[in-house]
């Protein structure tokens, strides 16, 4: 099978599954992102080992999964209340801070006793993996969890303190469609950048990192990302204003493409073409989700502090 055929086959199988899990949300979306985090961190550990680093891979995975859990703070608090009754429960920022503080203490103490060469490089590579993959992917979960009724500013948006079943269903749909719109916008941006660059590209965008990318392709990708978010606003995301849709689309078009370049930089430094060969025709998880990983924190913070401030 040709490389293009493999890409299409993987996409036909994987995309509907990912979109279904994103729309379902809750623990199903958490489980998918947990698998994504684990695989991405294993691929990342492979990259940094080519530079002589020996990251603490197990600790990196554990802490990243704990960070992912902190972005389900209200859902977990509600479930804990049902199962255990009234128990002490930290605020979300407290939970994130505890995870990161304990991580740094354990990381340094383990490095002190493990006796591996290049401890400075090991500590740096492990810390970067947790922040770049663990924390950034957690923001993807955060985007979906904003639409949990316990997190959402229902009074300001719906004008009532309690929601009826129809409003609850609408809130759930908004959450699912927001993540789906983000994913589709990223995929359309990548596609438009690729074909726009091939047909019209004349000026190299960043030849030191990615020789084939062009300024014209990047512009096509950015315009397509904005257009796709505007379409989503009128089709399924009526809570967004036109300005908010344009801003989020611009984030995808600019920050998402920068994320692609950042991952290319890491691979080029490691001397590999793909982060792995897990997905035939697509490379690895890092190759496929680099834009999502990089743009998710920006979109999460924009929704949390601007759209739903």
Image (tube, grey):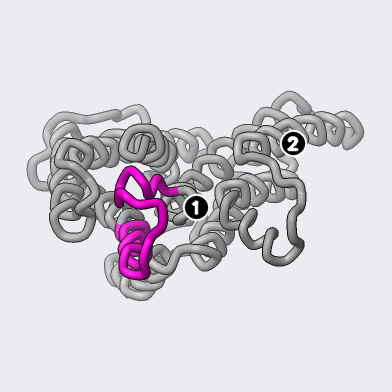
- Compared with 121, 293 (above or below) is below
Q: Nearer the viewer, residue 28 or 37?
A: 28
Name the spot of residue 58 as percent of width and height, x first.
Answer: 74, 49
- The stretch of residues the image draws in magenta is 152-177
Q: In the image, what residue occupies the spot 36% across and 46% down?
A: 155
Sequence order check, earlier mark of 2 and 1 = 2
Name the spot of residue 127 as percent of width and height, x first.
Answer: 66, 33
The answer to whether residue 286 is seen in the rendering is no
Q: In the image, what residue occupies the spot 40% across and 38% down?
A: 304
- Label 2 crowd bin: few (<14), some (14–19), many (20+), radius 10 Å: some
Q: CA distance from mark 2 to mark 1?
A: 28 Å
Q: Quadrant of residue 170?
A: bottom left
Q: Quadrant of residue 244?
A: top left
Q: Is residue 55 left or right of residue 68?
A: right
Name the spot of residue 118 as percent of width and height, x first.
Answer: 76, 27
Q: Is residue 102 left or right of residue 199?
A: right
Q: Which mark is residue 150?
A: 1
Name the spot of residue 73 as percent of width and height, x first.
Answer: 59, 49
Q: Quadrant of residue 207?
A: top left
């Amino acid at each position: 099978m040709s490389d293009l055929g493999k890409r299409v086959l993987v996409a036909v199988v994987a995309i509907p599954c990912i979109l279904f899990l994103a729309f379902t949300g809750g623990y199903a979306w958490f489980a998918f992102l947990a698998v994504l985090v684990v695989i991405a961190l294993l691929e990342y550990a492979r990259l940094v080992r080519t530079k002589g680093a020996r990251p603490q891979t197990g600790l990196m995975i554990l802490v990243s999964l704990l960070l992912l859990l902190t972005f389900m703070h209200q859902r977990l608090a509600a479930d804990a209340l049902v199962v255990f009754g009234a128990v002490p429960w930290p605020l979300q920022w407290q939970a994130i801070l505890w995870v990161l503080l304990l991580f740094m203490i354990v990381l340094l103490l383990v490095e002190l006793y493990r006796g591996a060469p290049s401890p400075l490089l090991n500590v740096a590579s492990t810390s970067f993996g947790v922040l770049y993959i663990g924390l950034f992917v957690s923001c993807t979960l955060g985007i979906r969890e904003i639409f949990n009724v316990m997190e959402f500013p229902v009074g300001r948006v719906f004008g009532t303190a309690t929601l009826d079943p129809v409003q609850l269903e609408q809130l759930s749909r908004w959450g699912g469609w927001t993540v789906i719109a983000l994913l589709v916008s990223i995929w359309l941006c990548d596609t438009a950048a690729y074909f726009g660059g091939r047909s019209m590209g004349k000026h190299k965008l960043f030849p030191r990192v990615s020789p084939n990318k062009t300024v014209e392709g990047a512009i096509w990708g950015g315009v397509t990302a904005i257009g796709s978010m505007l379409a989503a606003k009128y089709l399924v995301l009526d809570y967004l204003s036109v300005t908010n849709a344009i801003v989020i689309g611009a984030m995808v078009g600019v920050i998402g493409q920068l994320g692609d370049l950042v991952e290319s930089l890491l691979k080029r430094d490691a001397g590999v073409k793909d982060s792995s060969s897990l997905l035939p025709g697509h490379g690895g998880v890092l190759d496929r989700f680099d834009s999502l990983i990089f743009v998710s924190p920006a979109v999460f913070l924009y929704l949390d502090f601007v759209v739903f401030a």
